[in-house]
Amino acid sequence: MRQPILMGYRPSYPSWRAQDIQVLHAAHSLSELGHPVTLLANRTDPKINGKAVLKSYGLLDTEHLDFRLSPSTHLGISGLWFRQSTIQWWMRHKGTVIVRDLNRFKQLQAWLPNKQRIIIEAHQLPSIQASDLGLNPSSLFQIEQKMLQHAWGLIANCGGVMDLWLSQHPNHCPTHRMVIHNGTAPSRLLTSQKTENIIRCLGSLRPEKGLQKLLPVLKESPLPIEFVGASPDEMAAFGNLPAHITVRPPVPYPEVPKLLATATGLLLPLENNRFGRSLTSPLKLWDYMATDRPILAPNLPSIREIQSQTNRHMLYYEPDEPIDLLAHLETPFPKREKPFLRSWSKRARELSGFLSR
């Protein structure tokens, strides 16, 4: 029997947030490989259960997945339940804890026995993120070093994140390290003979994605543009838009592939900042690549890294001066591209191999 795994996150369900999608698929795929996996989560619906959440993602309950939702939607009660359940797992098992929230587990580890193998899963470096925001990073830096002292391994979602950890903590990073990119579900591999005359962009519209620089160009687009997945505040922040640009709220996860597969092209916005250049493996890009639709992507090292590993063709634009994006929009698009599927199962096999070292 493989060693038990605790997914040291605190996601919320039901949810269509990228991190929540990634965590649930990661846990489910590991459990399908025979790892006894425990995933504890907040609930946003008082009536839903774990099986219903899995079904909403197109997933089946598995023998080795212990997926538990908090008994309450109240965040305070949920926090107490999460802490108690984590302690119970910690005392009953000896296995691996995959941690993303370093501060939470630093507090627990201060008074729990040192019996678990800790793996840090990094999608950013908190101290650098704070520094980039003009905040004092010293306390976060100390938390990172403290957790690294206890960590058996370090995995990162892309090469830039790993490089940043190694540069900031050169003498503390564990010897067991691996870059493991995101993925998508095989059901997302979808092509369509029907094509709507529209460019679609999936996901939130947060300012750091550089949309303000793209908007002047998109306002000149000869093709309709549709943003799918904006929050009410994000939609309001856009203000008045020309008739050919529409913004709509998130759609259920299973409905996304059809929207992508029927678009003329798919737009990926990212700003030329530290996050865009180095610290992202966009979940929506893996969904994009599972279609045969042309992808309009920023010419950034993070995206070039993914392209080099997948050989999926992309139409690049310069995020700082995206006038070449307009040139792409004014040129007839290729009718078909070759889809690329990186499944969650493949990602789980990479992670399982890492755990067996």
Image (spheres, rainbow, N blue to C red):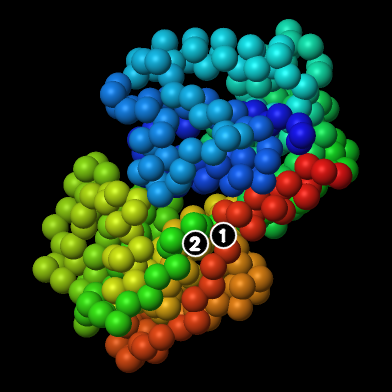
39 and 329: which one is in front?
A: 39
Give the x, y percent position of residue 106: 69, 20
Tell me the residue at 76%/36% (across/down): 2
Q: Quadrant of residue 109?
A: top right
Tell me the residue at 82%/34% (across/down): 152
Mark on residue 343?
Answer: 1
Secondary structure at badge 1 equals: loop
Tell me the residue at 49%/76% (across/down): 339
Name the residue type under label 2. Answer: Pro
Answer above or below: position of 80 versus 343: above
Q: Which residue extends farthest left?
A: 243
Answer above or below: position of 298 versus 136: below
Give the x, y percent position of residue 29: 59, 46
47 and 342: which one is in front?
A: 47
Name the residue type under label 1. Answer: Ser
Q: Which residue is labeled 2 in the image?
A: 186
**Does 237 sit left or right of 324 as displayed?**
left
**Does 27 sit left or right of 350 as displayed?**
left
- C-alpha span from label 1 to label 2: 6 Å
Secondary structure at badge 2 equals: helix
25 and 166: which one is in front?
A: 25
Tell me the residue at 61%/17% (across/down): 86
Residue 50 seen: yes
**For the residue carrying disc 2, how many other residues have a C-alpha within 10 Å: few (<14), some (14-19), or many (20+)?**
some
**Does 78 sit left or right of 179 as displayed?**
left
**For the residue carrying disc 1, how many other residues have a C-alpha within 10 Å: few (<14), some (14-19), or many (20+)?**
many
Q: Do the residues labelled 1 and 2 touch (CB within 8 Å)?
A: yes
Answer above or below: position of 203 versus 65: below
Q: In which quarter of the image is the C terminus?
A: top right
Residue 129 seen: no
Give the x, y percent position of residue 129: 58, 40
